[in-house]
Image (cartoon, helix red, strand yellow):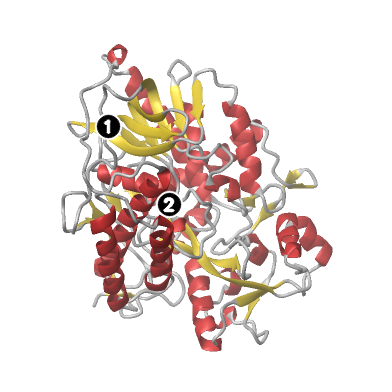
Amino acid sequence: MFEGPRYLVAFNPKRVPHCFTDVLILGGGLAGLRAALAVDVGLKVTVITKDDLRGSSSVYAQGGIAGVVDPEDRFDNHVKDTLSAGCGLCHESVVDLVIREAPDRIAELIGWGTKFDERNGTLELGREGGHSHHRIVHALGDATGREVMRAVIEQTRKLDNLEVWPDTFTIDLLTIDGICRGAIVWNRKHGKTIVWARQTILATGGVGQIYRETTNPEGASGDGMALAWRAGARLRDMEFMQFHPTVLYIAGGARSLITEAVRGAGAHLVDRDGFRFMPEFDSRAELAPRDVVSRAITEVMERTRHSNVFLDLSHLDGTAVRARFPGMAALCKTFGLDLTRDRIPVRPGAHYMIGGVAVDRVGRSSVPGLWAAGEVTSSGLHGANRLASNSLLEGLVYGAHVGEEVSQAVLKDEKRDELQALSLSHPKTTASSESFDLADIRNSLRSLMWRHVGVERSGESLQEALGTVEGWCRYVLPIQFSEPAGWQLQNMLEVSRLMILSALERTETRGVHVRSDCPQTLEKWITHIGWTRGQNAPWHESINQTVTSAMLPTKMVLSKD
């Protein structure tokens, strides 16, 4: 496997400005800001985000936050639902930790001013695919992420020890003797800056933009995973990209997510002829986990030779639908569609990256001084398929734990008054970026990933994709670009290659990873697949638990072959 350079740009500590901070947080979404709120107020915190604080994927979350707040529900129910969706690859101890903290984290948000939807003075709870009970708290109908981030941003503005750098791109993590010491960043006003930090937290989100069809915002290009990879961190579960089943599919329109709560409220999925097809695939019908629904939709599109299927809400009370989903009703109206009467065209789109930087129960990566939280990680919570509305919850729980652990690490450091610039540089190369059409390569990569590494894969198709991406890597990675478009493309290429390699390695079908040439779910693959820079072969990490049929979704049978 061709490896690009350790650092993407040339830098010399004598020629760039320096900044010093106790805790550096890369990413301004929910996980990053929750970490900032947990850091000791006596420590300086610097948050760097390539957009502004309202540009993260967290803002776009529609459905809500899963948590056991109904007296009729139980923690064990939520744990069982999560394990079942994860298809045998969840870490039970992590699942139990996160789910038991959910009520307190939801209460914390309410205390910070989050206005969740209520009915008769109590929280209104929704139900989504894979959940056995109504347990999803939501806000503004279908704009939970926007409301949660509003409240959290307001809370962070009260912190005197916090500084936010918006519109700043993180180029690389800085490591000396294998220890993370901060990062080199760039913005248009100051150019390159070296930020030295005692501890660094990655909270950069996902990688949906490597696919042509995605619900993710422009910034979700896998930068954090690529940064960690070049710095020597262990990455795992890179074959597991979750595709959301219902993305609005209208030519010329943005690929907008249609929240799973729409199906939870009773919407049906129908084909071009109006036939409701989900009951033939799973007894839970439209409320089956996302991987099951996405695969069913893909099969129906092939069977009917049509580019999409449809969501049908015409049998539901129109007034109630508009009240529950005001954002979606307004979006559909933009395209001349009435959510309550018309069939809404949908198809799957890349939504959530399950794999990422391998972390332990408190968010510690394999690189000393580097921590991570949220979608950039592989924490063991989601297994092979994330249960709906567990993502914001993960960001809250891991953000809090990382912030607390990082504080302790800094406060216990006897040399913490000695932070200074260190001797570290990277030379300029002769590789030229002339005649490069970055947009063309980016668009080609996104189309290739959608065709070959999408909802369904095969060994032959993956090999073809790997050959193409390896070719691009050989001539794109050595170039030292001067602006984010180039660095972002390099990150996308590195992450895409790891995803393809992992998908080739896992010769079975499990969760969101569907191999048409390997349809069985095999006992020998109850393991993580991981990668570390400098090692051409993957490493495997066994999961210490007994997987039973109850931990696998309907129609997925464990085989010893």
Toward the top, the furthest residue is: 417
Residue 47 place in picture, x, y as percent: 46, 30
* Mark number, residue 11: 1
Residue 470 place in picture, x, y as percent: 25, 62
- Reading the image, the residue beneath label 2 is 221
Toward the right, the furthest residue is: 319
* Mark number, residue 211: none
Q: Quadrant of the C terminus?
A: bottom left
Q: Nearer the viewer, residue 196 or 478?
A: 478
At mark 2, the secondary structure is loop
Q: Residues within 10 Å of mark 2 (few under 14, many from 20)?
A: many
Q: For the residue marked with disc 1, what is the amino acid?
A: Phe
Q: Is residue 515 above or below residue 356?
A: below
Residue 368 place in picture, x, y as percent: 25, 33
Q: Are marks 1 and 2 in contact (CB under 8 Å)?
A: no
Instruction: Please give the name of the residue rendered at 41% of the width and 44% of the height, measured from the top-left corner.
Output: 484
Distance, label 1 to label 2, CA atoms, is: 24 Å
Q: Nearer the viewer, residue 450 or 244?
A: 450
Q: For the residue marked with disc 2, what is the amino acid?
A: Ser
At mark 1, the secondary structure is loop
Classify residue 133 as left or right of residue 51: right
> Which comes sooner in the sequence, label 1 or label 2?
1
